[in-house]
Amino acid sequence: MKQDLYVVAVLTAKTGKADELRKLLLPAVEAFRQEEGCKAYALHEDTQQAGRFVSYEVWRDKAALDGHMKSPTMQQATPKLQQLLDGEMQQFLLDTLLQL
C-alpha cells in the first residue's frame, strides 16, 4: 500500500511583515485544502516567534504535492512570498516510521 506524503513547511516573515504574511497565507490555505490529492493542510504560528509559520500537510503522493506547487494559488502567492519572507521557505518531506 502506498504511503501518504507528509510535509512540514516553515515560513519566516521579514521584520514587520508578519501581518502581511498571515493575511496572504490564511486564504491560500483554504484554497490548498481544495486541491486534488490534499488530505490535510494545517497552518500554525510559532508562539515563541511571531511571524514564523509552520504548515503541516498530508498529500496523497509526490505527484499531488508537485501539482500543489504549480497550482494557480501557489503561483500567485510566490512573488508575494519572496517579498515577505526572511530567507527561503523550508520544506521537509517526511516518511512515516511509526503511526499514532
Image (cartoon, rainbow, N blue to C red):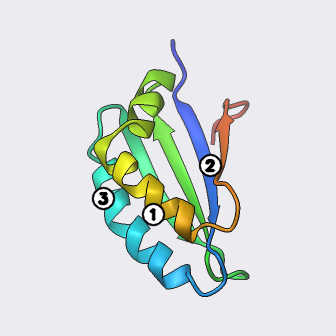
- Mark before the other along the chain sequence, 1 or 3: 3
Tell me which amino acid carries mark 2.
Answer: Val
**Residue at the spot 56% in from the left edge and 81% down from the top edge:** 17
Percent position (x, y) of residue 39?
39, 39
Q: Give the crowd class for mark 3: few <14, some 14-19, many >=20 residues within 10 Å.
A: few
Quarter where residue 87 is shown: bottom right
Reading the image, the residue beneath label 3 is: 30
- The C terminus, quarter of image: top right
Q: Which mark is residue 8?
A: 2
What whole-number distance in Å separates the C-alpha atoms at marks 1 and 3? Answer: 17 Å
Q: Secondary structure at mark 2?
A: strand
Callout 2 touching callout 1 (CB < 8 Å)? no
Q: Is residue 28 left or right of residue 83?
A: left
Mark 2 or 1: in front is 1
45 to 41, vertically: above or below: below
Where does the image place residue 46, in percent across and percent down from the top left?
65, 75
Decide if residue 56 is on the left or right side of residue 31.
right
* Secondary structure found at label 1: helix
Which residue is under mark 1?
Answer: 80
Work out whether mark 2 precedes mark 3 in sequence or the reverse, and give the earlier one.
2
Q: For marks 2 and 3, give the CA distance.
A: 17 Å
- Type of amino acid under label 3: Glu
Q: Mark 1 or 3, which is nearer the eye?
A: 1
Callout 3: helix, strand or loop?
A: helix
Q: Is residue 15 above or below residue 39?
A: below
Label 2 crowd (10 A; few <14 / some 14-19 / many >=20): some
Which amino acid does the dot numbered 1 rest on? Lys
Residue at mark 2 to residue at mark 1: CA–CA distance: 20 Å
**Circles 2 and 3: CB atoms closer than 8 Å:** no
| Residue at image location 39% in from the left, 36% down from the top | 70
Residue 81 on image: x %, y %: 51, 61
38 is higher (above) or lower (below) than 81: above
